[in-house]
C-alpha cells in the first residue's frame, strides 16, 4: 500500500520536474522568437495599438498634472510640448516638419492650445472603445475642423505607414491607426517633460506597457491568423516569466525530493508545500537580487572582469567612501558599546533611581527614525546657527566665527550615529544581563570577591559574547545606515558607501556598475558579521537560563546612587530630551536661526502646512498602507514559520528561517539595489515603480523582527496546552482560535508593530524604490528637509514621532503592558 | 467505562525503537499503571492511546473501535478521552471555571448543563470556591486538580494521566494519590496512569505494566510484581533489593561471596544463579543459616537499617524499630531469609550495572 503512495509521489515529482524543464526550454525558445526581427517589425504597431487601452487613464493623470502647475510652468510645459510634437514629427518623416510648421503658422495665436488640442485628440482616439466615440465626434465637427483634424492625424502617421502591413492603409482611412499616433504623442509629451519626475514616471510606465503588450499582441495576432497555437503564444508573450517559473519549479522539485529522500518518507506533506511557498518567495525577491548583484560585480558586462572592483578602489571618491564607512562603523561601535555596557548594568542590575523609566526611555530611542536624530543634531551643532555652538560661543566668549563644533564632519557623523545606534547594543546586553543566573555572581561574592571584582571577573567575561554581538550589530547598522550620512555627511562632503550607492543609482544606468561594486562590498561586510554573530558567537553564549524566573541580584550603589542617577539623567537629557525638544521648537519657527520666543519668529504655519498639504496626506496614506500590508503579510508568514519551527519537526523548516535571517542582515540599500536590478521585467517579474516593490523590500528587511517575536512566544507555550484542548474534543483550527491564538496574541500584535513601525518611516530603501505615486512619508520628509523647508520637515518629523509613540502606547494597551518597544 | 485493546504496537522514531510489540488489553474500570524509568517508552504508549503519536505498526482499539492502525487514524479530539498532563496544561488565559467548562463548550452542551457539570466536578476536586480564579493565582496542587476536573468534566470513559503528581511536593502527592484513586473508584472510570514512581504505582494500580527500554518486562497486580518479579530488572526496580551470586547445589544455594555459606532452596533452578533478597525479608534471629557481624545500624524510627557482613559481602537487613536496643555493632548475628527471588545468572545483572554506571 505504501509503495503505491511512494510511486505516485515519485511520478508526480518527475512530472513536475519535466514540466519545469519544459518551461525553461520553451521559455528560452519563446524569447528567441519574440526578439526575432521579423516579428519585431510589426510589433511596434501592435503594441501601441494595445497601449491605447491605457490612454484614458494616462490622460487624466496628465491633465491633473497640468492643472497643478503654475501659470508660468504651464506655459513652459505647453511650449515644450509644442517643440516636442514638432521634433517628433520631424524625426519621423522628413518634410513632416515643414508641414507642421505651415500648420502652426496658420494658427500662430493658438499654438499652445493646438498642441494640447492635438493631445486631447490623441486621448479621444485612445483605444478601440473610444474610437466609436471619436467617429461620432468627427461627424459632429464642422467640416473645416474635421479636415484639420484628419490632417493632424495624417501628419502623425507619416513615416511608418510605408512599413505597415497590407490593409493598414485602409485602417488609416478609418480611425484605428490614429490610436497609435495618439499614444506616440502622449509619449512625446511625457518625454518632453523628462526633467520632471512625475512625467518621467509616465514615460517609464508607458514604455513598460509597450514592452509587455507588444509580445502579447504579437501572440494574439498570430493566434488569430492561426500561425501557432495559443499555448506557444502565451509562452512567447511571457517568455521570461515562463523561464522563471520553470527554474522555480525545478528547484522546488529538487528540494522536495532531497527532503523526502532525507526523511525516507515519500508521502507529500502539506507542511513542505508551505515551506516551498515561503522559500520560493524569498528565492525570487531576496536570493535572486542579491546573487544577481554579486554576479554583476564580477561580470559587469556579461563577461568576467574585475573592472568594477578596480574602479571601486581606484576612484578616490569611492575609496574615501569605503574608508569613511569603515571608520564611522568602527568608531560608532566602540563608542556605542562603551556607552551601552555601563548603562545596561546600571539600569538592569543596580538600585539606580528610576531604572524602569530609564530603560524604557533608552529602548524607545531604538524606534525613532535615525534621520530625525540627524536633523536634531544638525540643528544643535550646525557650525553657524547650531544651538550648542551659540551657547559655547557665549560661554567662552568666542568670536562670531563658525564653530567650535561642526556636525558636518566625520566625527560629527560618528557622534550622531552613536546616539542612534547605542540602543542596539544596550538592548542586546541588558537582555543577556537580565537572563544571567544570579547564583553565578553570588558564588563569586561568597568566594570573597567584591562587587567591582565580581563585575570584572564574572559578569563581564560572561557577557563577552553578548557584548561582541551587540557591538557587531551596532557596527553593521551604522555602516549600512543611509538616513544619517545623507543628511549630515553629504552636505559636509563626507560620503559613505550608502550615500554613494544612492547617488550612483540616481545617475542612471551607466553608473549602476559602480553602485553594484560598493553594494557588494557592503553586503560582504554585513554577511561576514552576520556569520560571526549568528554562527560563531551564538554557540559560545555562556548565559545560563534556568527554568524558573530569574530575579537578578541588585547591586546596592550606596553613596554612589544619587550621583550616578544624576549622571544617567544628564545623559538622557543630552541623548533624548534636547534633540527631540529641538525638533519640536524648530517646527514652530520661521527662521531656524532665531529663537522661537521671538514673536516674529513664531508660527503655526508649518504644522497647518503639514496637515493641509494634499501631497503630505497622500504620502502618509501611502506609508500607512504599505506598512500595514507589509506587516500583515509578514505576520502571516511569521505565524506559519513559528508553527513550523516550534510545533513540527518537519525537515527543511530551517531553510526559510535561514533565508529570512539572511534578508534582515542584508543592508537596506543592498536589498533595494538588488530589487531595482532584477525586478524590471528582465527576470519575468516587473514590479518596478509599483507599491509592490516597496512592500516586498520592507518585508525582506523586517520580516525577521516579527517572526522572532512570534516564535519566542510560541516556544513559551507548552505543547500540552494545545494537546489538552484537542483531547477535550476541539479540532486543530478551534484549538488555534481558542487556545494558541489568545495566548500568543500579545506577541502577534507586537510582531505586527515591529514590522509596521520601521516600514512606516523607512527611508533608505524608499529613496531607491519610490515612484511619483508611491512616495512615503519618510521620503517626503527627507525631500522637504533637503529641498524645501527645514521647519516644516521638523513638524513632520515630530508628527512621525508622535505616531510612533502613539502606536507604542496602543501596543502597550493592547497587550496589557506585556509589550512595548 | 471502556476497554483499550493494544495489538502488537511498535513505535520507532527513525531507527530508534521506543516501544516494541506492546500487546495487551486494559479492561473496563481497571486502574492501569505504566511504570518504568524515564525514556522507557511509557509516555509514548500513553500518547499513542491519546492520539498524539502514530504507531509505527500495530493496532489500537478503544471499546472495539479501531482508532489507530493501518490507514485508520482517529484524531485525539474524536476519541472522547480525558487526560491530565504532567505540566497540567491549565490555560493561563482562562479562569478555573472556563478551563473546566471548555470540553463541554466544544461539545456545544447547553449553558445550564455546563454549569451544573462544572460545579459538580469542581466539588469532587474541592475547588468550588476557586471557580473565578486565574491559574496564576493557584498553587501547584490546585492547578493539578483543575487539570483533573477538566479531564473528568465530560464524563470520559477513559482517563489518561501522564505523571500528574511529579511536580507536587511529597505531602501533597500522597493526598492527591488518594484522591485520584478515590475518584476513580467512585465513578468507575478506566484509568491509564504513567509514572516512574513505584510507590504511586503500588498504591493505586489494579495492574502494573513495568516497561524498560521499550519492552514490557512484566505485568500483573502490584503484589505479583513485587513478590514474583520475572527478572532481575523488575526485582531491582520495585522496592529495595540486594543481589548475590550463588550456585544451586544439593537443595541449597551456596554463596561464594559469603565464604561458602548457604541458604536452603527447593525451587527448580539449577547451576549458577542471581539471588535477590529484599532487606525486609531478612531477619536477625537467635539462629539461622547465615552468620555474620553487625557492622552498622541506623535507627529510622519505624525500622532499623542494618548492614551485616557475611563473608566478604555486606547484606542489608531491615529490622523492626523496637529492636534497636538489642543492636550492638561488632556482634555476631544470625540471619533467616524468606521469599528468595532466584534468577538464572544470565548476565542481565551485569548489563544493568553497566547501564547504571
Image (tube, coloured by chain):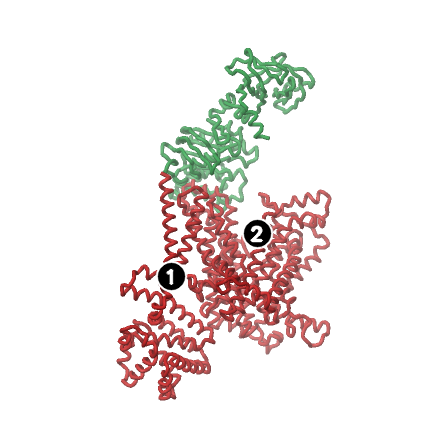
Compared across the picture, whether B319 is left or right of A51 comes to right
Question: Residue A701, position in %: x, y?
Answer: 51, 59
Mark 1 neighbour density, 10 Å: few (under 14) some (14–19) many (20 or more):
many
Quadrant into which the C terminus of chain B falls = top right
Query: Eyeballing the image, is A55 above or below A748?
Result: below
Q: Which residue corresponds to mark 1? A: A239
Q: Which mark is residue B264?
A: none
Q: Which residue: 37% across, 60% down?
A: A29
Front of the two marks 1 and 2: 1
Give the color of chain B as drawn. green
User: Residue placed farthest to the top in the image?
Assistant: B250
Q: In front: B292, or B145? A: B292
Query: Eyeballing the image, is A110 above or below B33?
Result: below
**Chain letter of the residue beneath label 1 in the structure image:** A
Compared across the picture, whether A270 is left or right of A789 comes to left
Q: Which residue corresponds to mark 2? A: A534
Question: Residue A624, position in %: x, y?
Answer: 47, 63
Mark 2 neighbour density, 10 Å: few (under 14) some (14–19) many (20 or more):
few
Query: Eyeballing the image, is A222 above or below B185?
Result: below
**Chain letter of the residue beneath label 2 in the structure image:** A
Assign a secondary structure to mark 1.
helix
Chain represented in red: A
Question: Residue A724, position in %: x, y?
Answer: 45, 41
Compared across the picture, whether A821 is left or right of B3 comes to right
The answer to whether residue A671 is seen in the rendering is: no
Earlier in the chain: of badge 1 and badge 2, it is 1
Amino acid at each position: 500500500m505504501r509503495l503505491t503512495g511512494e510511486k505516485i509521489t515519485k511520478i508526480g515529482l518527475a512530472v513536475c520536474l519535466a514540466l519545469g524543464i519544459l518551461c525553461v526550454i520553451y521559455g528560452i525558445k519563446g524569447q528567441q522568437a519574440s526578439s526575432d526581427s521579423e516579428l519585431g517589425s510589426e510589433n511596434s504597431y501592435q503594441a501601441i495599438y494595445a497601449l491605447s487601452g491605457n490612454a484614458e487613464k494616462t490622460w487624466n493623470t496628465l491633465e491633473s498634472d497640468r492643472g497643478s502647475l503654475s501659470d508660468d510652468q504651464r506655459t513652459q510645459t505647453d511650449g515644450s510640448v509644442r517643440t516636442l510634437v514638432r521634433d517628433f514629427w520631424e524625426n519621423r518623416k522628413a518634410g513632416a516638419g515643414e508641414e507642421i510648421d505651415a500648420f502652426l503658422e496658420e494658427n500662430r495665436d493658438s499654438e499652445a492650445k493646438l498642441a494640447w488640442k492635438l493631445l486631447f485628440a490623441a486621448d479621444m482616439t485612445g483605444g478601440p472603445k473610444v474610437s466609436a466615440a471619436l467617429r461620432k465626434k468627427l461627424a459632429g465637427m464642422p467640416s473645416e475642423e474635421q479636415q484639420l483634424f484628419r490632417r493632424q492625424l495624417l501628419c502623425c502617421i507619416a513615416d511608418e505607414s510605408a512599413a505597415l502591413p497590407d490593409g493598414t492603409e485602409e485602417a488609416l482611412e478609418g480611425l484605428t491607426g490614429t490610436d497609435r499616433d495618439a499614444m506616440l504623442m502622449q509619449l512625446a509629451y511625457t518625454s518632453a517633460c523628462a526633467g520632471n519626475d512625475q512625467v518621467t514616471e509616465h514615460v517609464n510606465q508607458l514604455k513598460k506597457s509597450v514592452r509587455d503588450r507588444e509580445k502579447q499582441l504579437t501572440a494574439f495576432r498570430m493566434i488569430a491568423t492561426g500561425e501557432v497555437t495559443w499555448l506557444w503564444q502565451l509562452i512567447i508573450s511571457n517568455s521570461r516569466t515562463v523561464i522563471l517559473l520553470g527554474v522555480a519549479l525545478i528547484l522546488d522539485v529538487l528540494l522536495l525530493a532531497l527532503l523526502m529522500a532525507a526523511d525516507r518518507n515519500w508521502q507529500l506533506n502539506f507542511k513542505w508545500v508551505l515551506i516551498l511557498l515561503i522559500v520560493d518567495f524569498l528565492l525570487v525577491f531576496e536570493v535572486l537580487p542579491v546573487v544577481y548583484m554579486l554576479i554583476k560585480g564580477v561580470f559587469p558586462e556579461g563577461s568576467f572582469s574585475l573592472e568594477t572592483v578596480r574602479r571601486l578602489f581606484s576612484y578616490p571618491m569611492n575609496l574615501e567612501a569605503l574608508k569613511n564607512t569603515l571608520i564611522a562603523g568602527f568608531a560608532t561601535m566602540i563608542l556605542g558599546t562603551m556607552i551601552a555596557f555601563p548603562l545596561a548594568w546600571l539600569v538592569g542590575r543596580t538600585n539606580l533611581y528610576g531604572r524602569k523609566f530609564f530603560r524604557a526611555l533608552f529602548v524607545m530611542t531604538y524606534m525613532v527614525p535615525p534621520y530625525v536624530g540627524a536633523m536634531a543634531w544638525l540643528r544643535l551643532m550646525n557650525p553657524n546657527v547650531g544651538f550648542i555652538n551659540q551657547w559655547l560661543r557665549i560661554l567662552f566668549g568666542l568670536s562670531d566665527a563658525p564653530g567650535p563644533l561642526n556636525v558636518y564632519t566625520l566625527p560629527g557623523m560618528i557622534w550622531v550615529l552613536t546616539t542612534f545606534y547605542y540602543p542596539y547594543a544596550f538592548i542586546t546586553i541588558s537582555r543577556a544581563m537580565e537572563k544571567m543566573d544570579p547564583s553565578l555572581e553570588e558564588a563569586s561574592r561568597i568566594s570573597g570577591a567584591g562587587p567591582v571584582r565580581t563585575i570584572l571577573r564574572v559578569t563581564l567575561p560572561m557577557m563577552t559574547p553578548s557584548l561582541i554581538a551587540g557591538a557587531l550589530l551596532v557596527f553593521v547598522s551604522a555602516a549600512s545606515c543611509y538616513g544619517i550620512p545623507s543628511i549630515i555627511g553629504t552636505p559636509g562632503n563626507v560620503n559613505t558607501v550608502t550615500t554613494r550607492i544612492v547617488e550612483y543609482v540616481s545617475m542612471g544606468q551607466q553608473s549602476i556598475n559602480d553602485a553594484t561594486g560598493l553594494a557588494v562590498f557592503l553586503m560582504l561586510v554585513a554577511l561576514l558579521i552576520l556569520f560571526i554573530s549568528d554562527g560563531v558567537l551564538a554557540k559560545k553564549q555562556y548565559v545560563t537560563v534556568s527554568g524558573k524566573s530569574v530575579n537578578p541580584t541588585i547591586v546596592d550603589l550606596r553613596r554612589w546612587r544619587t550621583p550616578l542617577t544624576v549622571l544617567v539623567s544628564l545623559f538622557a537629557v543630552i541623548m533624548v530630551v534636547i534633540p527631540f525638544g529641538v525638533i519640536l521648537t524648530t517646527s514652530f519657527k520661521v527662521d531656524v536661526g532665531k529663537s522661537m520666543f521671538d514673536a516674529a519668529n513664531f508660527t503655526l504655519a508649518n504644522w497647518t502646512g503639514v496637515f493641509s498639504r494634499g501631497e503630505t496626506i497622500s504620502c502618509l496614506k501611502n506609508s500607512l498602507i504599505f506598512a500595514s500590508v507589509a506587516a500583515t503579510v509578514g505576520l502571516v508568514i511569521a505565524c506559519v514559520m513559528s508553527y513550523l519551527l516550534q510545533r513540527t519537526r518537519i525537515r527543511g523548516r530551517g531553510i526559510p528561517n535561514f533565508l529570512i535571517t539572511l534578508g534582515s542582515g542584508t543592508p537596506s540599500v543592498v536589498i533595494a539595489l538588488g530589487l531595482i536590478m532584477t525586478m524590471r521585467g528582465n527576470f519575468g517579474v516587473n514590479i518596478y515603480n509599483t507599491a509592490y516593490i516597496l512592500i516586498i523590500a520592507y518585508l525582506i528587511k523586517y520580516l525577521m523582527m516579527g517572526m522572532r517575536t512570534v516564535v519566542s512566544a510560541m516556544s513559551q507555550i507548552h505543547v500540552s496546552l494545545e494537546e489538552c484542548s484537542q483531547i477535550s474534543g476541539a479540532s486543530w483550527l478551534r484549538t488555534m482560535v481558542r487556545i494558541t491564538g489568545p495566548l500568543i496574541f500579545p506577541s502577534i500584535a507586537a510582531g505586527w508593530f515591529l514590522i509596521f513601525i520601521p516600514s512606516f518611516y523607512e527611508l533608505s530603501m524608499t529613496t531607491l524604490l519610490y515612484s511619483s505615486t508611491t512616495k512615503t512619508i519618510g521620503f517626503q520628509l527627507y525631500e522637504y528637509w533637503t529641498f524645501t523647508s527645514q521647519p516644516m520637515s521638523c513638524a513632520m518629523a515630530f508628527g512621525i514621532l508622535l505616531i510612533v509613540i502613539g502606536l507604542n502606547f496602543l501596543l502597550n494597551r493592547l497587550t496589557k503592558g506585556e509589550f512595548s518597544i | 467505562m471502556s476497554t483499550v485493546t493494544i495489538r502488537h504496537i511498535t513505535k520507532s522514531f527513525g531507527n530508534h525503537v521506543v516501544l516494541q510489540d506492546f500487546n495487551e488489553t486494559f479492561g473496563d474500570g481497571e486502574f492501569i499503571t505504566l511504570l518504568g524509568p524515564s525514556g522507557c517508552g511509557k509516555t509514548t504508549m500513553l500518547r499513542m492511546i491519546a492520539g498524539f503519536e502514530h504507531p509505527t505498526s500495530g493496532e489500537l482499539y478503544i471499546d472495539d473501535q479501531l482508532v489507530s492502525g493501518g490507514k485508520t487514524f482517529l484524531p485525539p479530539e474524536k476519541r472522547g478521552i480525558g487526560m491530565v498532563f504532567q505540566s497540567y496544561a491549565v490555560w493561563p488565559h482562562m479562569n478555573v471555571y472556563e478551563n473546566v467548562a471548555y470540553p463541554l463548550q466544544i461539545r456545544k452542551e447547553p449553558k445550564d448543563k455546563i454549569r451544573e457539570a462544572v460545579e459538580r466536578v469542581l466539588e469532587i476536586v474541592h475547588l468550588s470556591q476557586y471557580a473565578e480564579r486565574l491559574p496564576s493565582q493557584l498553587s501547584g496542587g490546585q492547578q493539578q486538580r483543575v487539570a483533573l476536573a477538566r479531564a473528568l468534566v465530560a464524563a470520559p470513559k477513559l482517563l489518561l494521566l501522564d505523571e500528574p503528581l511529579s511536580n507536587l511536593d511529597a505531602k501533597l502527592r500522597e493526598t492527591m494519590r488518594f484522591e485520584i484513586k478515590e475518584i476513580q473508584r467512585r465513578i468507575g472510570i478506566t484509568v491509564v496512569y504513567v509514572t516512574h514512581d513505584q510507590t504511586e504505582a503500588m498504591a493505586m494500580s489494579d495492574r502494573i505494566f513495568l516497561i524498560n527500554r521499550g519492552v514490557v518486562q512484566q505485568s500483573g497486580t502490584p503484589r505479583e510484581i513485587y513478590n514474583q518479579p520475572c527478572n532481575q530488572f523488575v526485582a531491582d526496580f520495585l522496592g529495595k533489593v540486594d543481589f548475590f551470586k550463588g550456585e544451586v547445589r544439593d537443595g541449597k544455594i551456596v554463596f561464594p561471596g559469603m565464604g561458602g555459606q548457604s541458604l536452603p532452596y527447593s525451587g527448580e533452578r539449577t547451576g549458577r544463579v542471581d539471588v535477590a533478597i529484599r532487606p525486609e525479608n531478612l531477619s536477625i534471629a537467635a539462629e539461622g543459616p547465615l552468620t555474620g557481624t553487625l557492622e552498622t545500624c541506623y535507627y529510622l524510627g519505624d525500622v532499623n537499617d542494618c548492614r551485616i557482613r557475611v563473608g566478604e559481602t555486606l547484606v542489608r537487613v531491615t529490622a523492626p524499630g523496637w529492636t534497636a536496643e538489642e543492636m550492638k555493632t561488632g556482634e555476631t548475628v544470625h540471619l533467616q531469609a524468606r521469599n528468595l527471588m532466584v534468577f538464572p545468572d544470565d548476565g542481565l545483572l551485569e548489563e544493568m550495572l553497566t547501564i547504571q554506571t
